[in-house]
Amino acid sequence: MQHKHQITTIVENIQTKERQLSSFAELITKEHLSKFQNIKKTFEADAMAKMEENRLLRIGIVGQIKRGKSSFINALLFNGNDILPKGATPMTAALTKIHYAKEPYAVLEFYSYEDWKSIEQTAKVAQENKSNCDFMGEISEEEEACLEIYTKAKNSKILNSLGKKETIKNVQKIGDLLDKLEEFVGVDGKFTPIVKSLELGVNIDSIKDIEIIDTPGTNDPVVSRGRVTQDFMGQCDVVFFLSMSSQFLDQNDMQLLAQNIPNKGVQNIYLVGSLFDSAMLDTYKDYDNISDLIENLKHKYTQRAKEEIQSSIDKNITIANSLFQALPPLFISAMSYNIATHYSSLSEEEAYTLENLNTMYNDNLDEDDLYYIANIDSIEEKIENVKTEKEEILKNAFSKVVEGVESQIVILNNDIRKSVESDLEMLQNNDVIQLEKKQQIIQKSMQKGAIKIDNVFTSYIIEIEKNFASLMQKIKNDMKSASSVKVETGSYTVTHSSTVDHGFFSMKNLSGNRYETTRSTETIYYKYANVYDAIEQLEEFVRESEVSISTTVENIIDIKSFRKEILQSIVGLFDMQDDAFDPNDIIDTLRNSVNRISIPNVDIDTSKHIETVRKNFSSSEVRDDEIDSLKEEVRRVLSIILEDMKVEVQNQTVKIIKELKQAKEDFLPKLLSDSYEKLEQMKKNRDKLEATLHSYQELMQLL
């Protein structure tokens, strides 16, 4: 009862503050006001969730799309069996809650009509852009995802289920439940396009006291699902944040952490480096043995994480201190766990991965080696620890949410105050003539400087194109050595024998040697090629090429240098001694524009092409005429792989350049528009200076 009263009081205080601020709408940005509304909404949901009696401890599995969240949960709970769909596409990603139940069951929630209307509108925009001959750009990830969902579902009776729920029960085994879930969460499932969330009850004793939440990616291109994850964070007590080991806590991860977890009352955060086996395969040549490889990679990625977090601390990013306490990270490989668990009956994907791992140092990894690489037991240990601390965590959960919302309000209040102080100072220190002069200075200087700004963007675009062209040339050069099939000479000995009949009346017959056999040997030479060596050479080429592409994309643009050059080109347009110019008038907008530029991730799957070599050559060795067939097949597969890589590189080039070109096109108009609107408002306020100053003073007292 006390908590309910506290929630009501806090919500009423937020509403009161929101109403008070709304009366000063001309002096405050719409963005600041909407943030107050969102704080109220999420706090109420978070607080009510925290005060539920006898509730389960909620553990959230969070991370970007394609970071192995579902594989991680399958390994942790289901012995590596694919209960949750792996490699989820934008269509199959749904919020999934898993908890204990005596009899397995599932409850599926479908999109609401409002959700679907938003998806449909975005899909139609994508459709129109794709069919528009004049449209030269590339549709966004959200548009692509919504179009995929919409295309699968339109003209289908499944849309009659919008806004409803489906319950699956009366099953005895988890496997039976999985079969029935296929049409709802499977890649080709009939209802998959419209599933928004899934509640899963499973009879696994180890989760009796907890509820595990598999969230859609925080970078989910379907915005409504991304918001579901953000909003749900405050209802979790513990968070396991998954980041790809080879790109551990990259810029996108840190941005997502900073946006989604701070001030949500989540104090227990664990950092998990996923897909560790992939990181091993990418870098094993740098180390002498598998032990050195594992330990050095863990040390390297931990150091990288420390540096990223320390940088965040220096920038006063709220989440940073909690992340620092979460070090060192836990590095895991769900795939290695699956291989170890299914060692005697591997799937095609598991067998392929094991073969690659074994070729690193010509080892034959056994189950114990694979469990060591998997490191899932470290996660189980952490979960057991939080289960023992459950009562303490739940006891403090409500107060942490309250602390969080109070912190959010203080931060937002300070942001508004700084903005208002800046506007008030400008209003007090500038008369109408000065404001008009400032407006003219900014507009003229910006227009004159358009070429300088354009040159900075253009130089980076040219550099990007050059880097990608060099990358493709390097891959083509590497392809030449990968296409050479090593031919060796072998030999074997053939023994010839012949028998001579000396006749019945011969002396040899009298001595019992009528028939005489003579023998001679002949050495036969032949050429042969090892099929496995050719396949390994192909795989090595693919691995090295993928690393080259990833590295090039990751380092394609130095954001710091780019930001610095743009700032210099802008600030250099103005006379710093001129009282009519304040650099802050344009620099904040500039930073926001540059910070929106992001580098997409690389995703190439060439394994299916290499697999055709295995299927076409069942024996480990080919000879003579078959060698030419092997060479031809290797060249054919390489040309397909090269084309795939070429397409991927071109796609990355288009995406990144599109980001820069869009930023360039929006940059000046946005700066001019913002400065114009701000100064126009200032002129209006200046015309009624006395009344406006009084309003500002009232607002400052309120803040």
Image (tube, helix red, strand yellow):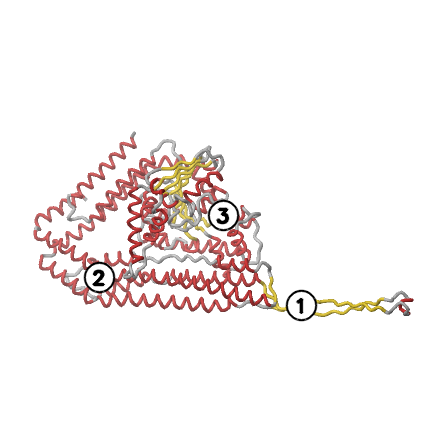
Question: Could you say whether the residue bearing mark 1 is in a helix, strand or loop?
Answer: strand
Kindly indicate whether the residue at mark 2 contacts the one at mark 1 (C-beta within 8 angstroms): no
In this figure, which residue is indicated by the disc labeled 1? 491
Q: CA distance from mark 3 to mark 1?
A: 48 Å
* 262 lies above or below 5: below
Mark linked to residue 116:
none
Q: Give left or right: position of 59 versus 293.
A: left
Q: Nearer the viewer, mark 3 or mark 2?
A: 2
- Crowding near the residue tagged with mark 3, few <14, some 14–19, many ≥20 C-alpha atoms within 10 Å: some
Is residue 630 among the parts visible in the rendering?
A: yes
Question: Which residue type does callout 3 highlight?
Answer: Asn
Q: CA distance from mark 1 to mark 2?
A: 75 Å
In this figure, which residue is indicated by the disc labeled 2? 668
Residue at the limit of the structure toward the front, as seen here: 504
Nearer the observer, 443 or 109: 109
Question: Could you say whether the residue bearing mark 3 is in a helix, strand or loop?
Answer: loop
User: Residue 264's x, y, as percent?
Assistant: 32, 42
Question: Which residue type does callout 2 highlight?
Answer: Leu
Within the image, what quadrant is residue 108 found in?
top left
Q: CA distance from mark 3 to mark 2?
A: 51 Å
Q: Quadrant of the N terminus?
A: top left
Question: Which residue type does callout 1 highlight?
Answer: Ser
In this figure, which residue is indicated by the disc labeled 3? 375
User: Residue 685's x, y, as percent?
Assistant: 11, 51
User: Residue 449's x, y, as percent?
Assistant: 21, 66
Q: Give left or right: position of 426 versus 65.
A: left
